[in-house]
Image: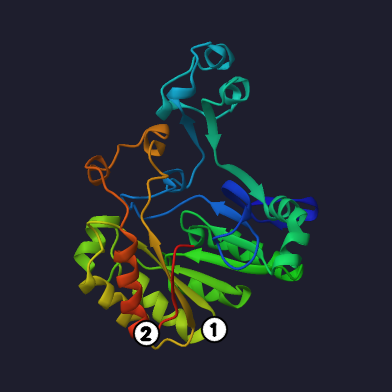
Amino acid sequence: MVYGSQATPVATGTVFNLQRYSLHDGPGIRTTVFLKGCPARCWWCHNPESQDPHPEIAISSSYCIACDACLLACHEGLKPREQCVLCGDCSSTCPTGARSVVGSTMTVDDVVSQVLRDRMFFEDSGGGVTFSGGEPLSQPHFLKALLAAFRSHEIHTCVDTAGLCCSDALLEVAPLVDLFLYDLKCIDPARHLEGTGVDNRQILENLERLSTVHHNIWIRIPVVPGFNDDNEEMERLARAVAGRHAVRQVWLLPYHETWAGKPERYGKELPIKARTGVTPPAPEELENFARIFRDHGCTTSIGG
């Protein structure tokens, strides 16, 4: 938190990406604001740069042309990644983008001014702004201030969350959210802990509480081979969301490998599961899972 004139508090947070023309983060054309920080460590995570709540250095060795521009620019002698002070001098001088600082401190006004540039796309398509991550509720005060600001501008708001937060924080922002994208991964607690590194009790309890106070929730389930791609687990998930009037849709998201190469960029070890070669689920398998949800009365789509 910083202070402006007359000691007025100004909410700040850490943002690692602002993606325009998003078509899969809620209805219409949207601008997605990615907030840093997430307590989970899903082995298939597509945004490993979202996990650490602080800015970090990214290094793409395949782009490096060994020109030494970064070495000459660094006042610290280009120390190892863990000792980097994140001044950004190396990334600003790198001619190929091989080095970059991921994550920056932004105020609410910073974010609002950038997102409002896309207002006409929102109005024409029924879109708006989506807050994702990471887990956006890892920065609850910043998120609430952002939601309030966009509500004052009459912009449709969406929060993409896994429910990995305290219930009070979730319920506090709920009145400011037009749509929740709620990520569920599996019901079996041991399997969930093994695949994500976190317990799922809080996730399920938060879904229960949110369903009693909010009217518009879309459930999103990543279908990950070797983790939750079996009829028994999909049946459990279907039973967990069926009958909730607040749940308007279920989306089954097929596993894909767009994250490949990202862990190395951030100095993270490649998960063991990922090293074994995991292939995306077959279309007929996804359709079978969708049928399980539809049999429980859930409006269900694949992809998105």
Q: Which of marks 2 and 1 is nearer the N terminus?
A: 1
Q: Residue furthest front?
A: 284
Viewed as shown, does residue 105 lie left or right of 276?
A: right
Height in image: 241 above or below 101? below
Q: What residue type is labelled 1?
A: His
Distance from the alpha carbon under mark 2 to that under mark 1:
15 Å
Mark linked to residue 13: none
Q: What residue type is labelled 2?
A: Ala
Viewed as shown, does residue 199 lie left or right of 211?
A: left
Q: Residue 203: x and y, percent?
A: 36, 70
User: Quadrant of the rendered structure where residue 126 is?
Assistant: bottom right
Q: Tags 2 and 1 in contact by the CB under 8 Å rule?
A: no
Q: Which of 89 and 188 is in front in this view?
A: 188
User: Quadrant of the rendered structure where residue 148 is?
Assistant: bottom right
Secondary element under disc 1, as helix, strand or loop, is loop
Dot 2, how many residues are within 10 Å of its Cα: few (below 14), some (14-19), or many (20+)? some
**Residue that badge 1 annotates:** 215
**Residue that badge 2 annotates:** 242
Q: Residue 192: x and y, percent?
A: 26, 63
Height in image: 294 above or below 35? below
Q: Is residue 169 visible in the rendered structure shown here?
A: no
The total of numbered circles placed on residues is 2
Q: Residue 297: x and y, percent?
A: 39, 86
Dot 1, how many residues are within 10 Å of its Cα: few (below 14), some (14-19), or many (20+)? some
Secondary element under disc 2, as helix, strand or loop, is loop
Residue sitting at 48 percent across and 58 percent down? 138
Q: Nearer the viewer, residue 187 or 193?
A: 187
